[in-house]
């Protein structure tokens, strides 16, 4: 069963090439994005208590153009802030490493197992002065309940990508004029679903969304 928390969704013919361009606000114009949620900068490298930690498995970089995509979710429109889709059956039955792909230009995250897309979500990403880094990152740590010790902000279902403060996590508000301090913010319900299908060591690919990247 595919559950849709949305009114309209998007379709990607292939993960490496956008079906249509996305217009982003020009830098230096209008009001700066409001910070909807904090990142995890300054959190101790080995925090105590309810921490999922394990040796990373395969941390080799991934080129999104080389990803083998077998099946994508039947989505026809662009995801709007706060919207997501999830395939319960595929999440239960698909095996192997979860690979998460974050497309900054499209403002979307997809999670795959054995080339099958099991979930897709709108995202928040870093403000211009604290951009979300691109590259391949192993999930270093998972904490179901986490609070930033800098901003005293809850960050549920946090999955750490770097030790200097970049993570996937649930955010209470997603909007076009919101941004993060470099993290990838997700609808809270989707963040919880994603948390259950990933393991420490699974890889997250963050790319600009442009074919030349």
Image: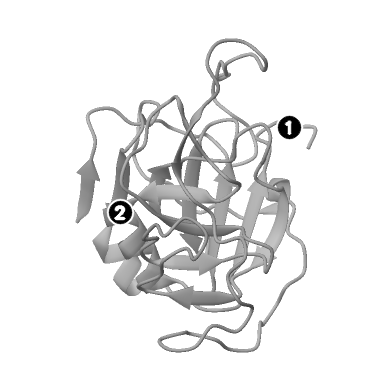
Residue in the image at 45% along x and 66% along y: 158
> In this rendering, is residue 84 above or below 135?
above
Residue 78 picture quarter: top left
Circle 2 SS class: helix
On the rendered image, what quadrant is the C terminus found in? top right
Q: Give the image location of residue 73, x and y in percent.
A: 37, 45
Applied colour scheme: one colour
Residue in the image at 52% along x and 60% along y: 150
Is residue 96 something one can see in this rendering? no
In the image shown, does 52 or 208 lie closer to the viewer? 52
Circle 1 SS class: loop
Classify residue 40 as left or right of residue 65: left
Quickly name the residue at label 2: 188
Asked if disc 1 and disc 2 are in contact, CB closer than 8 Å, the reply is no
Q: Give the image location of residue 16, x and y in percent.
A: 65, 39
Q: Give the image location of residue 52, x and y in percent.
A: 48, 85
């Amino acid at each position: 069963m595919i559950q849709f928390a949305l009114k309209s969704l998007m379709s990607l013919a292939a993960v490496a090439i956008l079906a249509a361009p996305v217009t982003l606000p020009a830098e230096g114009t209008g009001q700066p994005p409001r910070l909807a949620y904090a990142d995890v900068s300054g959190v101790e490298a080995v925090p105590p208590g309810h921490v999922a930690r394990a040796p990373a498995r395969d941390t080799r970089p991934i080129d999104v153009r080389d990803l083998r995509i077998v099946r994508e979710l039947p989505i026809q429109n662009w995801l709007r802030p706060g919207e997501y889709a999830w395939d319960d059956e595929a999440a239960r039955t698909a095996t192997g490493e979860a690979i998460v792909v974050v497309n900054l230009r499209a403002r979307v995250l997809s999670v795959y197992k054995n080339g099958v897309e099991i979930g897709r979500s709108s995202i928040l990403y870093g403000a211009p002065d604290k951009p979300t880094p691109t590259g391949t990152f192993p999930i270093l740590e998972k904490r179901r309940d986490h609070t930033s010790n800098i901003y005293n902000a809850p960050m549920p279902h946090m999955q750490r990508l770097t030790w200097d403060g970049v993570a996937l996590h649930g955010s209470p508000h997603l909007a076009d004029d919101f941004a993060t301090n470099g993290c990838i913010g997700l609808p809270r319900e989707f963040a919880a679903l994603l948390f259950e299908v990933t393991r420490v060591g699974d890889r997250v690919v963050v790319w600009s969304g442009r074919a030349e990247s």
